[in-house]
Amino acid sequence: QKEVEQDPGPLSVPEGAIVSLNCTYSNSAFQYFMWYRQYSRKGPELLMYTYSSGNKEDGRFTAQVDKSSKYISLFIRDSQPSDSATYLCAMSTFLAAGNKLTFGGGTRVLVKP
Amino acid sequence: EAGVVQSPRYKIIEKKQPVAFWCNPISGHNTLYWYLQNLGQGPELLIRYENEEAVDDSQLPKDRFSAERLKGVDSTLKIQPAELGDSAVYLCASSLDASGGKDTQYFGPGTRLTVL
């Protein structure tokens, strides 16, 4: 079983809809949680970062972490065709030195005009 | 500011041939990472450098893979000999300072390797 599980999708939604993405994890030592967006033929780019349970909002994006359930979510409001990409969750433990990220497999999202 | 630069972007080789990938991190970033990304999967860490020192290479298949980061800036990842299963995207990332576990990693566009 993988440490981080993510539904591969694809997830197809109409423009303007809310996109809901999630990941589950098994390692309770994970303390930092990130969402990356990856366009086709590009490298991942960091969207949001959080380290505490609860919600964090940034524009149209909301990240949610529930450490008790080992579950994280990303919500995209008012989705646009430009949001069509693969979304990767990533997590890391606190290390004295180093930052090894463990990624989920990614969810492909398609926002249709 | 320029991002992480990787070359080549695409490489097609015959199995058993050697191949090398090059990465130039963001200026001033001390930490450099090489990741492997298979189709439909998330990136998996191969090796991490702090300046010129490889501090985590536990996932690097050392029988055929090697890496170096001369002078703590550019890095090269080599495969010799390549196998069919090595076909994947090889991503390089860099971060300013990896201590504390929450430093942002910036990724390059990757090198897509196809082994025939």
Image (spheres, coloured by chain):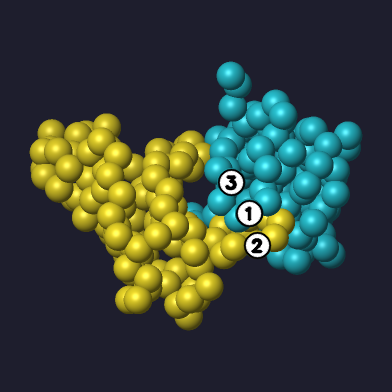
Chain colours: A yellow, B cyan
Label 1 in the same subunit as label 2 = no
Same chain under badges 1 and 3? The reply is yes
Q: Which residue is mark 2?
A: A95
Q: Nearer the viewer, residue B95 or B7?
A: B95
Image quadrant containing the C terminus of chain A: top left
Is A7 situated left or right of A15 in this image? right
**Vertical placement of residue B88 versus A84, above or below:** below
Q: Residue B98, percent across and down?
A: 67, 48
1 or 3: mark nearer the eye: 1
Rendering coords of residue B25 (x, y %): 69, 32
Residue A13 in the image: state x and y as whole percent: 15, 47
Q: Residue at x 45, y 42 (%)?
A: A46
* Chain ID, mark 3: B
Amino acid type indicated by mark 2: Leu
- The secondary structure type at the circle numbered 2 is loop
Looking at the image, is A3 positioned above or below residue A103? below
**How many numbered marks, from 0 up?**
3
Left or right for B48, reference B88: right
Q: Chain of mark 1?
A: B
The Cα atoms of the two marked residues, 1 and 3, are separated by: 7 Å
Amino acid type, residue under disc 1 in the picture = Gly
Under tag 3, what secondary structure? Answer: loop
B107 and A53: which is toward the camera: A53
- x and y, in percent, of residue B90 in the image: 63, 47
In front of the other: A54 or A79: A54
- Which of these two is toward me, B101 or A12? B101
Q: Residue at x 30, y 60 (%)?
A: A54
Count neighbours of disc 3 (C-alpha within 10 A) and say few if under 14, some if 14 to 19, many if 20 or more: some
Q: Residues within 10 Å of mark 2 (few under 14, many from 20)?
A: few
Q: Please check whether the numbered discs 2 and 3 fall on a single chain.
A: no
Tell whether label 2 touches label 1 (CB within 8 Å).
Answer: yes
Question: Mark 1 = which residue?
Answer: B100
